[in-house]
Image (cartoon, rainbow, N blue to C red):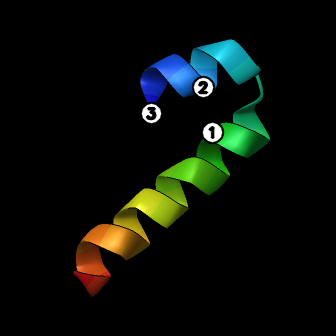
Amino acid sequence: VQVICAHLNEAKACGLLARVCRAARSGV
């Protein structure tokens, strides 16, 4: 995720990805 965040260079996109990742981990 960090690499993707660095590539996008967007805090908003980074936060969104982090939320999706957490939701996915919690869901699974």
Where residue 4 appears, as percent x and y from the top left, is 56, 25
Q: Residue at x 73, y 42 (%)?
A: 13
Where residue 17 appears, as percent x and y from the top left, is 57, 50
Does residue 11 appear left or right of residue 15 in this picture?
right
Amino acid type indicated by mark 3: Val
Does residue 19 appear left or right of residue 6 in this picture?
left
Question: 3 or 11: nearer the eye?
Answer: 3
Q: Are marks 3 and 2 in contact (CB under 8 Å)?
A: yes
Q: Are marks 1 and 2 in contact (CB under 8 Å)?
A: yes
Q: Residue at x 72, y 33 (%)?
A: 11
User: For mark 2, what is the residue?
Assistant: 5
Going by the picture, which residue comes out furthest to the bottom? 27
Q: Residues within 10 Å of mark 3 (few under 14, many from 20)?
A: few
Amino acid type indicated by mark 1: Cys
Answer above or below: position of 7 versus 15.
above
Q: Residues within 10 Å of mark 2 (few under 14, many from 20)?
A: some
User: For mark 1, what is the residue?
Assistant: 14
CA gap, disc 3 to disc 1? 8 Å
CA gap, disc 1 to disc 2? 5 Å
User: Which comes sooner in the sequence, label 1 or label 2?
Assistant: 2
Answer above or below: position of 15 versus 5.
below
User: Which comes sooner in the sequence, label 3 or label 1?
Assistant: 3
User: For mark 3, what is the residue?
Assistant: 1
Does residue 15 appear left or right of residue 11 in this picture?
left
